[in-house]
Image: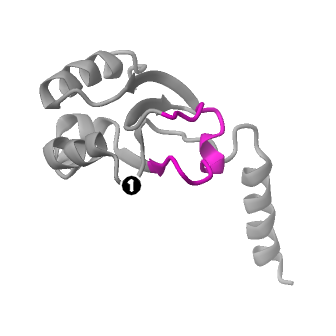
């Protein structure tokens, strides 16, 4: 194996073994959902399909997690929910805030504003 290739592999291994490796580094809004959930469908129709175009979506992109599948390894710090949809704001490998259920677009954005205000300034 050539020296440069070895150094690349070594750097990759070091990054993998580093503390917090695999943890979510930037802010994300995790939505825990499941197929057939009527409130999940309503969220998608009213908010989800356009969320990435909003200021909120740019600050905390939406990431979907299926409640009926294993939780992703990089979200081990998030406690799974039975209530769907549940929205979990995460940043730097830790949970910042959580909203259980979807009571409508206006309430969602008001609650999300409160959640986003808890993020550290970057």
Give the colouring mode of the picture: one colour
Mark 1 Cα within 10 Å, few/some/many (few <14, many 20+)?
Answer: few
Q: Is residue 81 left or right of residue 120?
A: right
- Mark 1 — residue? 35
The total number of labels drawn is: 1
Q: Is residue 1 left or right of residue 26?
A: right
What residue lies at 75% left-to-right and 38% top-to-bottom?
Answer: 19
In the image, residue 21 lies at what x, y percent? 69, 45
Tell me which segment is drawn in magenta.
Answer: 65-82
Residue 69 on the magenta segment: yes
Where residue 75 sits, quadrant-wise, is top right
What residue lies at 37% left-to-right and 37% top-to-bottom?
Answer: 85
Where residue 2 sits, quadrant-wise, is bottom right
Q: Nearer the viewer, residue 66 or 120?
A: 66
In the image, residue 31 lies at what x, y percent? 40, 41
What residue lies at 72% left-to-right and 52% top-to-bottom?
Answer: 15
Q: Is residue 61 left or right of residue 79?
A: left
Above or below, 101 relative to 1: above
Q: Nearer the viewer, residue 89 or 91?
A: 89
């Amino acid at each position: 194996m050539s020296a440069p290739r070895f150094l690349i592999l070594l750097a990759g291994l070091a990054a993998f073994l580093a503390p917090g490796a695999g943890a979510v580094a930037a802010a994300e809004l995790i939505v825990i959902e499941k197929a057939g959930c009527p409130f999940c469908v309503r969220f998608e129709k009213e908010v989800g399909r356009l969320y990435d175009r909003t200021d909120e979506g740019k600050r905390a992109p939406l990431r979907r997690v299926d409640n009926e599948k294993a939780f992703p390894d990089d979200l081990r710090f998030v406690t799974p929910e039975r209530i769907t949809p549940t929205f979990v704001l995460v940043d730097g490998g830790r949970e910042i805030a959580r909203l259980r259920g979807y009571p409508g677009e206006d309430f969602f954005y008001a609650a999300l504003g409160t959640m986003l205000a808890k993020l550290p300034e970057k």
